[in-house]
Amino acid sequence: MIYLDHGATTATDPRVVEAMLPWYEKKYGNPSGLYEFASKSREQVESVRKIIADSLGADPEEIYFTSGGTEADNWALKGIAGQGNRFSGKHIITSKIEHHAILHTCDYLERQGCGVTYLDVDEQGMISPEQLERAIRPETALISIMFANNEIGTVEPVYEIGQIARKNHILFHTDAVQAYLHLPIQVKEMGIDLLSASSHKFCGPKGVGFLYIRDGIVPEPFMHGGAQERRARAGTENVPGIIGMGKAVELGMASMGQEMAAVRELRDYMIHRLQSEIPFIRLNGSAKRRLPGNVNVSLQFIEGASMLVLLDTEGICASAGSACTASDHTVSHVLQAIGLPEEIARGTLRFTLGAENTKQEIDTVVDTVKLLTENLRGFSEEYQQIIRPDA
Ligand code: PLP
């Protein structure tokens, strides 16, 4: 198998699994317990809080564990602008290319009377800081713009957004699920007030993540119940998951610089080969401001869904858009937002590379995509007319 779908999820690092196992089998104490056995779990959870805080230039008290990116996104938005909150019924600014964890939450908040502005993006998927500034209203409470897009890999101008938010005394949340540990992030320097991340995108276990909440911000609790997470997020902590995430952060921080460079090189090699060897191909997203592992291309005159099935029979895992919409064959909202015509968008493939991928694997994938594209285009009358107008 050649796995090029790291944007959907990553393999859990064996060192992460090893770090987790004792906390299932032997050291299973509930961190809320008052005895020595339980305090071991509590200490370990707190040490992970510090590891994560250090990775972002934050304080441990600013890190809250969640069940993943979706919960962190829901909490950030509903906790700030949902009912029963200081900012309820106010205004949020987001973008048209956010993950559904943000867009569907905004839709829910709109039904509760909150105003939401969805910023356009340019053809590369970038929001415009000027347009953002123009969208600010006196009642704007929150800006939520993703750090990097999960489909086309475009990295948004986070620093500029942070400055605009600060200048206008508006909170800034960023969904960094695709960016955290793949790009350097420093929350204070970047003016980020809230940040979501998810462990399974950086070789940690699934079902665990965190929300960074800057000190002084008190969002409405998302889960009501026990007093865990300083009464902000009730529920017994996923101790093995949190410990696994902590190990993945340690490993990720140690190797990020080196891996970023290596994955970027492979990505650029793949893009170069695809673009120079396959006609009627288009790279989606920004060529420069791009996640290290993201290759998103549209192949004209083919159906991305057919290509994925054929790639699967060759043992190659890729995706057509975001994994969350894999079963839904409508053109993704991100490709619509960058203005891709439907007939081109339908031939879109997303390959997301990871540190374990090799040049040899990339060559195999490009050769296979090339061959399958030729075969599939053989069935396209439109394509045949273009290459053989006299036939
Ligand atoms: N936000 C983005 C940008 C994502 O890519 C994803 C998952 O793909 C999520 C949020 C949801 O994260 P999780 O799978 O941890 O709920």
Image (cartoon, rainbow, N blue to C red):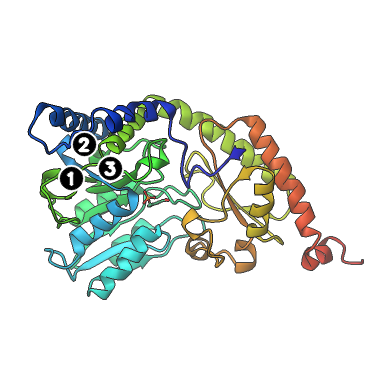
User: Is residue 229 in sight in this rendering?
Assistant: yes
Quadrant placement of the N terminus = top right
**Could you tell me residue 335's position as x and y percent?**
52, 61
User: Image quadrant of residue 341?
Assistant: bottom right
Q: Which residue is mark 3?
A: 190
Question: How far across and down, in percent of the image, does residue 309 sit?
Answer: 66, 54
- Image position, residue 352 (x, y; %): 53, 43
Residue 98 in the image: state x and y as whole percent.
39, 58
Q: Are marks 1 and 2 in contact (CB under 8 Å)?
A: yes
- Measure how far apart labels 3 and 2 are at the Cα level: 12 Å
First in residue order: circle 3 vs circle 2: 2
Is residue 245 rendered to the left or right of residue 96?
Answer: left
Q: Which numbered disc flags the more N-terminal residue, 1 or 3?
A: 3
Q: Residue at x 17, y 27 (%)?
A: 40
The three-letter amino acid code for the residue at tag 1 is Arg
How many neighbours does mark 3 have within 10 angstroms: few (below 14), some (14-19), or many (20 or more)? some
Residue marked by disc 2: 58
Tell how many labels: 3
Q: Is residue 363 above or below residue 129?
A: above
Residue 34: mark = none
Q: Which of 141 and 378 lies nearest the eye of the viewer?
A: 378
**Residue to which mark 1 is pinned:** 214
Q: Residue furthest front?
A: 25
Q: Residue at x 43, y 47 (%)?
A: 155
